[in-house]
Image: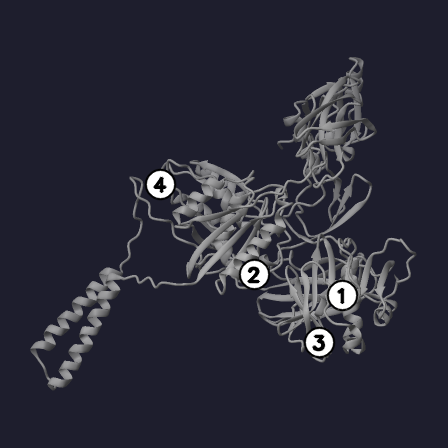
């Protein structure tokens, strides 16, 4: 409410004829109003904003705001916020952005983290609670397992502090933690996690000295270490024997010869003493201070995480290669005291749990994020409401925390954990955002000075007072000559300092330090050349010596892989590779530069940019005095056959034969098979000879029942190096006999109307409001009639389907009958 009032007041300050736009900052920012000079429309727009528990994608928000700039008039930006932005996010704001602080400090406590690991006999949950406002308080903490409350404990949370509690829980899948009681925000009093399982696992152990490994696995319930030859297992352990090239199963490697990709032995080290313990949940409550090791491999680690290390010698490393997770021990268990320590079963069970959960537990997302699932047919929210997802729909945005279920086309279900954004729990508004940057000087008839500094006038008055005092003291000297000369020297110094303050001189000190931000394209088109691009960056970093660097990786979005410093971190894991938006990568890179040293931005890409306005971003960087160096990567020529699309008619009649043209693009010539299916059966398969370039193949298809008929084309070529683009989907609208859908608010309300329509040879379908489906089911009808349907009866998704059916597909929509008629608009 305070933000809305502030926005309305700022709008009233606009001069006559001024226009205003409104962008709502959230995980998926939206434009509520665009360049309107109507104050009433502005007021209605901001009053429609509702608070959510989601975080904010400031990069997308600021980019969306800048896209609304009109070239024929000056534009200002105002950020109305509580100021909970990181320094990087502040630097992403448009130049000249003005910050208006809103919000207040109040009593609030939040569950900021819930981590669950599988241990022998059950689960271990670690709950983190933070006091983000108010005095010390006690509050009940409740933990549920699979929807049943297992324990309740009163927790004292000191003011401004964070507390952690660890609980042993029974076996289960869904774990939820709740803070009961009253505080300002209810959305952050809950946290959810999906638990990994240890039971029912099969493991294969390779090597000779496997005694301690066998003992460890035998102590974990449900782990079978004696699979049949050739039987598929869940993970493998290699003890002193090489790990096969291209290992496809999660694994643990213990002092293996030759190492693995990213972990290369370069000799051995004697008596390494562990001094580095990474802040990883795997090592919580694990004491390695007494760990003694006779000797270990001297490892060179690239693109992995050192969990435990001695000076210059990583000892326990974790990582992922080609999507396969692993753990690496640089030492033999028999030549250390780890197997006889109390930490060994804890550490081992957690490693096994992490490997077992690699494919089992999907990553949690935050409120406001779109649910995953390209093959989803329906989603069920935490309250049990089910919404269908049609072929033309995207999966919905998760608008509430909890466990969401995504129903997939193959009949399986995927459970997704959705948690509130913990940054929203910080209530105290920031007084200022120091990293917001001023607008560059602009010359032109539209330039106007809206404020002037009073400092020169103040300094002039101060200088005048000093000069008057000097004149008086010159005439009447009541002290010795030596004292008077000292007084004159001090006055001269004061006058000089005042003059310097007035002149405000700037001194540029040369710096030999250079900060380089490498902006790496990791989109799908770089798949064959990504390794060489990373090697080029590694070589450039080595040649740079002690200079600082950062690495930004981009595809459709951008993410910081290595922050500014001198340490190269593993690759970013949250980059969408579907498209190439270099502008986003460059914008994020520029936000990392502080101006304290010489600055460089280096773009590493194959040049296949297909999203964002790269030229506009380059011009913006040029206006800031930054140039972008480009390193073009030669994309390796790999055999690749891709389905570019399927050409089908917009609409056909039921039973009609039509032609579907499959377009296949290939990088080489060769034999391939092209298959077209319609979801129920294979329409046809053709053995073809592809030519390098574009190839088109026609298939004859029979239109089935009315509605949307889904077609899927797939190409198979021996030696295809990229399989992600081997299929494509299209849909064709199949029109059946004229039909009307009658939706009844109460059973029987539409009976008379149905009889009238049927007498005119019109096919009529009557359903209750609870049976109302998605747009794919509505599309088979030429009109829909709501008979006495109350406004509270249809859900949001029902209304969206009706609205999309009427607006996008063109059929009619009528409302009437009874005391409760309700339309899409009201």
Q: Badge 4: how crowded within 10 Å, few (<14), some, or many (20+)? A: few
Label disc, if present, on residue 256 of the rendered structure: 1
On screen, residue 219 above or below 453: below
Q: Secondary structure at mark 4?
A: loop
Q: Can you identify the residue that label 4 sits on?
A: 15
Q: CA distance from mark 1 to mark 3?
A: 22 Å
On screen, residue 803 above or below 552: above
Give whichever of 444, 424 is nearer the camera: 444
Residue 826 percent across, percent down from the top left: 62, 33
Tell whether 654 sits left or right of 495: right
Q: Badge 3: how crowded within 10 Å, few (<14), some, or many (20+)? A: some
Mark 1 vs mark 3: which is more N-terminal?
A: 1
Mark 1 vs mark 4: which is more N-terminal?
A: 4
Q: CA distance from mark 2 to mark 3?
A: 35 Å
Residue 232 percent across, percent down from the top left: 86, 53
Tell whether 394 sits left or right of 411: left
Q: Kindly give the residue lying farthest to the top in the view shown.
A: 760
Q: Can you identify the residue that label 3 sits on?
A: 288
Mark 3 vs mark 4: which is more N-terminal?
A: 4
């Amino acid at each position: 409410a305070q933000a809305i009032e502030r926005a309305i007041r700022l709008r009233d300050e606009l001069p006559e004829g001024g226009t205003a736009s409104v962008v709502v900052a959230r995980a998926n920012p939206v434009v509520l109003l665009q360049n309107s000079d109507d104050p009433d429309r502005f007021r209605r727009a901001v009053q429609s904003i509702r608070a959510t528990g989601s975080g904010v994608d400031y990069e997308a928000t600021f980019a969306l705001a800048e896209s609304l700039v009109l070239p024929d008039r000056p534009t200002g930006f105002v950020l109305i916020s509580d100021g909970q932005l990181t320094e990087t996010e502040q630097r992403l704001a448009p130049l000249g952005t003005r910050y208006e602080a809103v919000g207040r400090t109040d009593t609030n406590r939040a569950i900021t983290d819930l981590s669950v690991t599988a241990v022998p006999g059950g689960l271990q949950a670690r709950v983190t609670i933070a006091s983000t406002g108010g005095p010390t308080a006690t509050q009940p903490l409740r933990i549920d397992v699979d929807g049943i409350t297992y324990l309740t404990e009163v927790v004292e949370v000191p003011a401004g502090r964070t507390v952690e509690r660890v609980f042993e829980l029974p076996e289960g899948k869904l774990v939820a933690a709740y803070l009961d009681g009253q505080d300002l925000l209810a959305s952050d009093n809950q946290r959810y996690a999906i638990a990994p399982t240890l039971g029912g696992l099969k493991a294969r152990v390779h090597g000779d000295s496997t005694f301690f490994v066998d003992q460890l696995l035998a102590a974990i319930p449900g782990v079978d270490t004696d699979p049949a030859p050739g039987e598929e297992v869940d993970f493998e352990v290699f003890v002193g024997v090489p790990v096969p090239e291209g290992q496809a199963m999660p694994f643990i490697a213990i002092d293996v010869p030759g190492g693995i990709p990213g972990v290369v032995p370069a000799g051995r080290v004697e008596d390494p003493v562990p001094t580095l313990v990474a802040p990883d949940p795997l090592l919580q409550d694990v004491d390695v201070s007494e760990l003694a090791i006779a000797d270990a491999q001297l490892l060179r680690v690239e693109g992995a995480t050192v969990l435990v290390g001695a000076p210059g010698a990583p000892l326990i490393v974790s990582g992922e290669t080609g999507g396969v997770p692993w753990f690496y021990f640089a030492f033999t268990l028999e030549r250390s005291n780890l197997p006889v320590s109390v930490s060994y079963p804890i550490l081992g069970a957690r490693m096994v749990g992490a490997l077992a959960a690699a494919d089992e537990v999907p990553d949690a997302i935050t409120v406001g994020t779109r649910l995953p699932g390209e093959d989803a047919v329906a989603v069920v929210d935490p309250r049990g409401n089910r919404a269908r997802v049609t072929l033309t729909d995207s999966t919905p945005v998760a608008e509430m925390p909890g466990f969401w279920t995504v129903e997939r086309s193959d009949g399986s279900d995927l459970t997704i954990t959705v948690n509130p954004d913990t940054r929203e729990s910080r209530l105290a508004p920031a007084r200022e955002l120091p990293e917001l940057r001023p607008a560059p000087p602009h010359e032109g008839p539209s330039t106007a000075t809206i404020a002037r500094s009073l400092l020169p006038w103040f300094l002039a008055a101060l200088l005048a007072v000093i000069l008057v005092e000097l004149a008086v003291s010159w005439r009447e000297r009541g002290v010795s000559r030596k004292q008077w000369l000292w007084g004159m020297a001090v006055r001269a110094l004061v006058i000089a300092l005042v003059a310097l303050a007035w002149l405000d001189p700037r001194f540029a000190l040369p710096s030999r330090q250079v900060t380089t931000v490498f902006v790496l394209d990791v989109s799908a088109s770089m798949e064959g050349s990504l390794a060489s691009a990373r090697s080029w960056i590694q070589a450039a970093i080595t040649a740079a010596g002690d200079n600082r660097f950062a690495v930004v990786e981009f595809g459709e979005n951008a993410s910081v892989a290595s922050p500014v410093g001198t340490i190269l971190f593993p690759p970013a894991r949250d980059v969408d590779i579907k498209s190439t938006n270099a502008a986003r990568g460059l914008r994020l890179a520029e936000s990392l530069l502080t101006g304290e040293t010489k600055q460089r931005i280096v773009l590493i890409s194959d040049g296949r940019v297909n999203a964002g306005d790269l030229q506009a971003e380059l011009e913006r960087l040029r206006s800031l005095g930054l140039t972008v160096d480009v390193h073009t990567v030669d994309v390796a020529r790999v055999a690749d056959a891709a389905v570019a699309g399927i050409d089908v008619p917009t609409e056909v009649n039921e039973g009609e034969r039509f032609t579907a043209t499959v377009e296949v693009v290939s990088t080489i010539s060769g034999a391939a098979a092209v298959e077209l299916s319609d979801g129920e059966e294979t329409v046809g398969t053709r053995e073809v000879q592809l030519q390098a370039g574009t190839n088109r193949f026609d298939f004859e298809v029979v239109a089935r029942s009315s509605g949307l008929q889904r077609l899927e084309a797939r190409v198979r070529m021996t030696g295809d190096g990229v399989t992600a683009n081997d299929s494509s989907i299209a849909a064709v609208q199949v029109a059946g006999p004229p039909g009307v859908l009658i939706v009844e608010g109460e059973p029987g309300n539409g009976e008379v109307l149905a009889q009238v329509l049927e007498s005119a040879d019109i096919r009529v379908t009557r359903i209750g409001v609870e049976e109302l489906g998605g747009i794919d089911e509505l599309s088979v009808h030429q009109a829909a009639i709501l008979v006495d349907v109350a406004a509270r009866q249809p859900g949001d998704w029902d209304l969206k389907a009706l609205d999309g059916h009427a607006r996008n597909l063109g059929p009619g929509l009528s409302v009437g009958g009874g005391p409760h008629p309700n339309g899409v608009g009201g």
